Image (tube, rainbow, N blue to C red):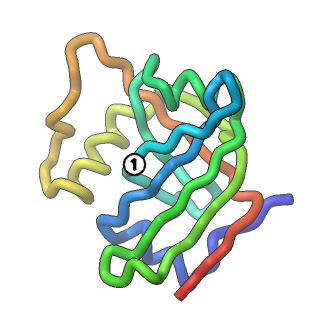
Amino acid sequence: MSQAIPEKYQDLFKKKAFASLGTIMPDGRPQVTPVWVDYDGQHVIFNSARGRQKDRNVRRDPNVALAIMDPDNPYRYVEIRGKVQEITEQGANEHIDKMAKKYLGVDKYPYGQPGEVRVLYKIKPEHTTTMG
């Protein structure tokens, strides 16, 4: 069952709010990474580079969880559990530049490495918990 992000918490995707993304390691242990996030009205979107740990984890097991805290009030947050429904390189370079503008105030993502391939991950929310 799909669950949209409650409208009252969608503003978190417009702020410089980092998400803590939880994925599952091959041995079943959790792995958590801070990520920049976006929301298209249906999917929570994050961007990474091919071959990183979170990339390998979600390709093997698409079940993820994220917690996004309001930078203006850390007692206000949304927790999202769902599955990565789409993994694509299409539009990933443009998206990381969009995220760099939002989070860093620059037009171009400054931390790219030679040969790095950017990847978009689209999460379909299945459960949300909110506070604040």
Left or right position of 69 against 84: left
User: Callout 1 environment at 10 Å: few (<14), some (14 to 19), or many (20+)?
Assistant: few
At which x and y percent is residue 104?
A: 17, 54
Identify which residue, 27 or 57, lies in the foreground: 27
Placement of 12 over or under 107, stated as above or below: below
Placement of 54 over or under 71, stated as above or below: above
Q: Quadrant of residue 121?
A: top right
At which x and y percent is residue 113?
A: 21, 20
At which x and y percent is residue 42?
A: 64, 59
Q: Which residue is mark 1?
A: 34
Identify which residue, 111 or 7, lies in the foreground: 111
Q: Amino acid at mark 1?
A: Pro
At which x and y percent is residue 131?
A: 57, 83
Furthest-bottom residue in view? 132
Identify which residue, 13 or 56, lies in the foreground: 56
Residue at x 56% of width, y 71% of height: 78
Furthest-top residue in view? 115
Q: Quadrant of residue 15?
A: bottom left
Considering the numbered disc 1 on the image, is that residue within a helix, a strand or a loop? strand
Identify which residue, 112 or 56, lies in the foreground: 56
